[in-house]
Amino acid sequence: MLAERLTANFYDGDTFHPEANVLKMRAGVALNDDDRIPWLTAIHAWITKKLPTETLIVACSALKEHYRKLLMADLDPSLVKWVHLQGSYDTIYKRMQARQGHFMPATMLRSQFDTYERPEYGIFVDVDQPLDQIIDFILQEIRQ
């Protein structure tokens, strides 16, 4: 919905995972830095390729600061807006249980919460509200 409102293209970072990562997560095994770096490098390469000619939104669980730095390497910071979706464990767990066909089981959410390093920058939005309000808030913050 955000991509639509911004006339942007949306990319889900999960589609960049190598098969080994998908199999590991499907088995309920949390990824470590060695697993995530090639995945993040692939996303960075994609962003670098697309950003000059395209407005894009990439959804990605860049949980640690050095992951976010890897994604931003050599990019013009004025072209990038970070949006950090925030929510309680229970809210996100329920949503993960309801999704269909995703390889990462909801039981792995704890590892994500344990790994997350909250940054000092970006737009922070509480996901425990209607989607249209979330999108309106993000758009308002982007345009400031």
Image: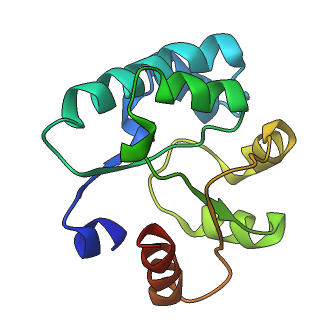
Q: Give the x, y percent position of residue 110.
A: 83, 47
Residue under the image location 74 percent in, 46 percent down: 119
Q: Which color scheme did the rendering employ for the protein?
A: rainbow
Residue 53 quadrant: top left
Seen from the viewer's position, the closer of residues 49 and 26 is: 49
Side (left or right) of 110 relative to 48: right
Q: Which residue in the rendered view is the most extreme toward the top?
A: 34
Seen from the viewer's position, the closer of residues 73 and 101 is: 73
Q: How many marks?
A: 0
In this rendering, is residue 99 above or below 66? Answer: below
In this rendering, is residue 61 above or below 34? Answer: below
Residue 54 quadrant: top left
Q: Which residue in the rendered view is the most extreme toward the right?
A: 114
Q: Give the x, y percent position of residue 44.
A: 40, 25
Side (left or right) of 122 relative to 138: right
Q: Give the x, y percent position of residue 84.
A: 62, 57
Residue under the image location 45 percent in, 68 percent down: 142
Residue under the image location 22 percent in, 59 percent down: 8
Q: Quadrant of the N terminus?
A: bottom left
Q: Which residue in the rendered view is the most extreme toward the left?
A: 53
Residue under the image location 69 percent in, 38 percent down: 63
Q: Give the x, y percent position of residue 101.
A: 44, 53
Residue 49 quadrant: top left
In this rendering, is residue 18 above or below 136? Answer: above
Seen from the viewer's position, the closer of residues 87 and 19 is: 87
